[in-house]
Image (cartoon, rainbow, N blue to C red):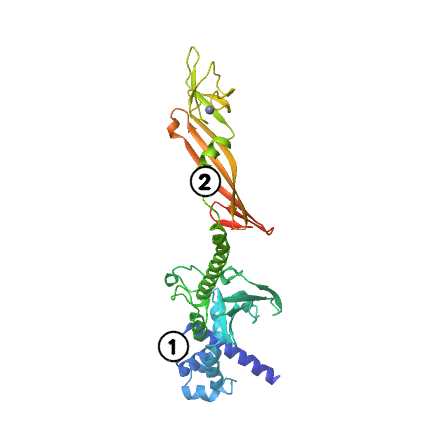
Amino acid sequence: MKINQREIKKREIKKTVYKILQEDEYARANDGYLIMRVVQELEPDLAGTAFVNVMNNLSFKGISCETITRKRRNWKTWEYEEYTVKEQKYAQLIRVQNLKGYVKVAVFFPAWLNKGIKTPRYEIFINVPGHEWITRELKENGTEFCWRGAMVSNLSNVYLGYYWDSQNYPETTYANQDARRTLSRLDCNNNKLSKLRRLKAWQQAALDKKTELKEKKEQEPWDKDMAMVPKEPNSFKEWMRKDTIKEYYIIYEYAKKGQTEGFCTRCQRVVPISHPKHRTSTKCPACKVKALYISKGKQKNLRTEGEGRLIQSIKDGIVIRAYICRWTIATNNINKSNFYIHEYERILIFNDGSSKRYYYGSDRKSVV
Ligand SMILES: [Zn+2]
C-alpha cells in the first residue's frame, strides 16, 4: 500500500515537472525555482511557509529534490519529444540511429504517442553510399506490417509542410540535434533543408540519378542502331506525295457554261476537264490517277493523308522504316499547301534472325 502511494506520488511529480518545464522556460535552467514551482503545484499549503520549513517537510510529503532534478534531466530526451508532439507543434517526431553501414530513421506520430504507443510507425533504412532506402511500416503493437519503397513524403501521415522554401515555413518534424546532424550529411541540391525535408530531397536526387542512368542505358543501343540507318533517297518524299495519298483532287473554278480546265493535285498540272461536279469521281487525263472534283467556291480547305514504308540495307540486315504523311491544301492558293511527313517506326532485321523495333513517340523514343 505504502509502495503504491509512493509510485503514485512519483508519477504525479513527473507529470508536474514536465508540465512546468513545458510552460516555463526559466524552470528549465534553475533547479531551485523548479522545486519551488513543483511544491506550489503539489503542496500549495506548504509553499506558503518559510523555505526551511518547506525543505524540512518535503521528504515527509514524499517529494525528493533529487527526483525533481532527475526528471528535469530526463525531460530533454524522450519525454520532451513526446510532450512537444502532443502539443501538436509537429506533425511527426523522428529518431535517427547510425547503424553499421546505414542510417535508420524512426518516425513517430502524435496519435500513437498519445495512446501510449512508443513504437515508431515507420523505420526508414538508408544506405547512403548506395543511394537506396527501404521503409518498414509497423503496426500499433510493434509487429511488422509491410515494406515500402516510397519516398518519405509519400508515406501516409507524414507531413513535411511546404517544401521549396523551408525558411519561411514552420518545421513539421521534431528531431534532436544528433538526428539533424546525421541527416544534414545527406547530399542534396539544397543545403538549407533539414530533417525529413532533407531526406526527401536526397531521395529525389537518388531517383533522378537512377532515371538518368536508365535513360542513358536505353539511349545507347538506340544511338548505335540508328547510326547504321542510311539517309532517305532524295526522291522519297515526292514518292510519298505521289503514291501513298488516299485522295487526290482536281480543283476547278465554277463556270456557268461549264469549266474546261482544272488542277490535278497529284501531277500538279492544269488538265482539261468537262462538266465537273463537286465531289464526284473522275480520272486525271494526264497522270491517270483516280481523283475527286473539288470546286474552289464550295471547299476552301482539303486535308488528306497517306502511309508508306521504306526498306534499306544496313550492316548484316535490313531496316523497314514506316512513315505517315499529311497534306493540307488551300484550294484558292495551291502554294499555301502543306505536305508533312513523319517517320514513326523502324524495324531492324538482322541476318541472324534477330530484330529490333523502335518507335518515335510524340515526346520520347522507345524500343521494344
Ligand atoms: Zn494528274
Q: Secondary structure at mark 2?
A: loop
Would you say residue 106 is visible in this rendering?
A: no
- Residue appearing at x 46%, y 66% in the figure: 199
- Residue appearing at x 56%, y 79% in the figure: 8
Q: How many marks?
A: 2
Name the residue tied to disc 1: 26
- Residue appearing at x 50%, y 55% in the figure: 221
Q: Secondary structure at mark 1?
A: helix
Residue 167: x %, y % from top left: 37, 63
Considering depth in this image, is 199 or 51 the residue closer to the camera?
Answer: 199
- Residue appearing at x 57%, y 81% in the figure: 7
Residue 69: x %, y % from top left: 46, 83
Considering depth in this image, is 352 or 254 the residue closer to the camera?
Answer: 352
Q: Pointer 2: residues within 10 angstroms few (<14), some, or many (20+)?
A: few
Residue 116, disc: none
* Type of the residue with mark 1: Tyr
Q: Pointer 1: residues within 10 angstroms few (<14), some, or many (20+)?
A: few
Would you say residue 78 is visible in this rendering?
A: yes
Considering depth in this image, is 74 or 343 the residue closer to the camera?
Answer: 343
* Type of the residue with mark 2: Pro
Does the closest atom of ligand 1 sit within 8 Å of the Cβ of label 2?
A: no
Q: Quadrant of residue 270?
A: top left
Q: CA distance from mark 1 to mark 2?
A: 87 Å
Name the residue tied to disc 2: 233
Q: Is residue 19 above or below residue 218?
A: below
Tell me the quarter of the image containing the N terminus. Answer: bottom right
| Foreground: disc 1 or disc 2 | 2
Residue 318: x %, y % from top left: 54, 46
Residue 88: x %, y % from top left: 47, 65
Q: Is residue 111 above or below residue 228?
A: below
Considering depth in this image, is 345 or 84 the residue closer to the camera?
Answer: 345
Q: Is residue 218 left or right of residue 354?
A: left
